[in-house]
Image (cartoon, helix red, strand yellow):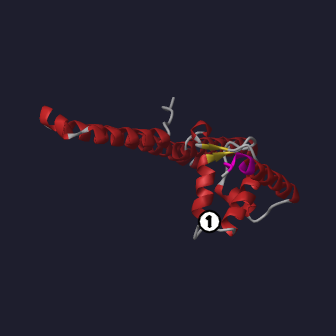
Amino acid sequence: MAKPMRTTAALADGVERLLSLLDSLNEARWMREVDPWLSFNAQVQALLDDWDGQQQRCRQQLIARAALHGMVGQAEFPSAGAAGMYHEDQRQWYRHFLGELQQYVIGGAEERCLRVSVTVVEVLFLLRLFVEEGVIEVRQLKPVFKALSRYMATPHQERLSYESIRKKYSTAPGEARVKVSRLLERLLNRAKADLPNN
């Protein structure tokens, strides 16, 4: 059975841990140890080896799958039903493989740093208001859409696609506008109530 993929979130955590360790390598420690940088370098190398291992496992799976395709391609299917079953099996395998690869790249839902309680359309309508009013200054929306697809989850969608966000950005149904307007009114009332009296 294939070893489960760690996510790049684990890689990011490893880099942050090494950055913290780097800050702790002060002059006092340099005086005590012969060469603390040798140990530090080994830890960075171990992190990269783990990353290389993840990529190598992916390559090995694809090489094995290509060998399977090569063998099957030389044979004739006994029936259209058998051919259909084979092609559906391949579709499912690649869907699973790419799903794991996607999880490796962007992390699982539990690693999302931004979980909102409103719908994607409502978030995007708020984003449009902020962009058009100059609250958020962006030259291109593409990086914003990519960040939202990677790091945001909603009550109804754990995984958001870049294409879906891009297409929904320009549309704001009446219901979404009403809900966002009510939300902004509540926020305004909260701001007025919480302002100091001076």
Relative depth, front residue between 149 and 27: 27
The magenta-colored residue range is 191-197
**Residue 191, image x, y percentages:** 71, 50
On the question of residue 188 being in view, the answer is yes
* Residue visible at 64% across and 68% down in the picture: 134
Residue 108 shown left or right of residue 45 in the figure: right
Relative depth, front residue between 61 and 153: 153
Residue 84 highlighted magenta (yes or no): no
**Residue 67, image x, y percentages:** 50, 45
Q: In this view, does 108 lie above or below 165?
A: above
Residue 21 shown left or right of residue 142 in the figure: left
* Residue visible at 50% across and 36% down in the picture: 5
The residue lying furthest to the top in this view is 1
The residue lying furthest to the bottom in this view is 139
Relative depth, front residue between 110 and 49: 110
Q: Which amino acid does label 1 sit on?
A: Leu
On the question of residue 76 being in view, the answer is no
Residue corresponding to mark 1 = 141
* Residue visible at 58% across and 43% down in the picture: 113
On the image, which quarter does residue 86 sit in?
top right
